[in-house]
Amino acid sequence: MNLPFFDLKRQYGELQEEIDAAISRVSASGMYIGGDELREFEREAAEYASVRFAVGLSSGTDALLAALMALGIGEGDEVITTPYTFIATAEVIAFLGASPVFIDVEEDTFNLDPDLLESKISARTKCIIPVHLFGHMADMPRIREIADRYGVPLVEDAAQAIGATIGGTMACGFGVAGCLSFFPSKNLGAFGDGGMVLTNAEEVEREIRVIKEHGSAVRYRHGRIGINGRLDALQAAVLRVKLKHLDRLVTRRREHTAAYDEGLARYVKVPVVRDGYGHVYNQYTIRTDRRDELAEYLRERGVPTAIYYPIPLHLQEVFRYRGYGEGDFPVSESLSRSVLSLPVFPEMTVDERDYVIETIVSFFEDKH
């Protein structure tokens, strides 16, 4: 058996009639930037996430960048985040001339450790960016309590976590802003790049709308430096279709991951889901000391895997100037050596899922 890691063609096949109709609607309208499709998607996304405002942007990275720009982050500021994430989280901080300040993650959730947060807050701390890695939210009640006590705004990196919850609150509902990615492999994926900022703060929404239009609120009049950060109408139309099906597709993911949990827990560390949290499983990531052996065994038998992330950000060459070194963030470093993400996507068949489980079990039980 040869499995895909994820299969966008299958998802398109299931939704083809609706997606093709949406694309045709945009094509016939002649409105390819802005327009009704974008306005309606922003309204529907805000309603889905139970926030007041949503602003579509050209990527998840630009969403993070615009959110920080709206908060005035710049030269000399510090922004606290985790080294165990995709580079975009810290990249936008450095791009603005601010300094990323890393703190280690929790071993069970892979997310920013609130126990370490307070000691890193200084007079220069202007923002905290928790990352909801793989679809399980960071401990936002504790993080927000600490942030509020020090008067530091929170920007949620929810690129992998649309629809994730703590209690009755969805991702992007805890901070002054929350940022989504619509990269095609995300749970809500576009037909290209796309992103969004969600917020309950009217002033943040207003500022981001100016930022994404080259800093212009009125055509050809520019009150600030901005970016070309628009989400185009075609992507908005496709995303409107997929948003209607998102909860159903996440339910399928959870069915697959429940089977993984049951079949694999004796052999590897399966993902933790804390009480009261709703995990949306953008990735299903296990841990094992025999990670590289297992990955090769699976590859030889037609099962693709991925490693998110093999090098923590504090050890990346681009952040060498920050002065971090090996051993500074031991949990992140340990994770980078032991994590392995397995295929999980809504259109995956039961036979494919069971084959993954059987192959992993055979690896451990046959003493390879």
Image (cartoon, rainbow, N blue to C red):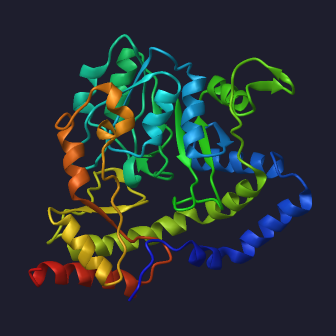
Question: Which of these two is toward me, 113 or 141?
Answer: 113
Which of the 4 quarters of the picture holds residue 308? Answer: bottom left
Question: How many marks overall?
Answer: 0
Quadrant of the image for the N terminus?
A: bottom left
What residue is shown at x 83% (from left), y 47% (from top)?
35
> Residue 36 in the image: x percent, y percent?
83, 49
What residue is shown at x 60% (from left), y 24% (from top)?
70
Question: Which of these two is toward me, 267 or 42?
Answer: 267
Asked if 139 appears above or below 294 in the picture, the reply is: above
> Residue 30 in the image: x percent, y percent?
91, 55
Question: Which of these two is toward me, 320 or 111?
Answer: 320
Residue 174 visible in the shown view: no
Q: Give the residue at the far left of this rendering.
A: 367
Q: Is residue 246 left or right of residue 218?
A: left
Which of the 4 quarters of the picture holds residue 112? Answer: top left
Quadrant of the image for the C terminus?
A: bottom left
Q: Is residue 109 left or right of residue 181?
A: left
Asked if 267 appears above or below 235 in the picture, the reply is: below
What residue is shown at x 40% (from left), y 68% (from top)?
254
Residue 183 visible in the shown view: yes
Which of the 4 quarters of the picture holds residue 235? Answer: bottom right
> Residue 196 in the image: x percent, y percent?
61, 43
> Residue 286 in the image: x percent, y percent?
26, 63
Asked if 65 appears above or below 22 in the picture, the reply is: above
Q: Is residue 57 left or right of residue 97?
A: right
What residue is shown at x 16% (from left), y 37% (from top)?
327
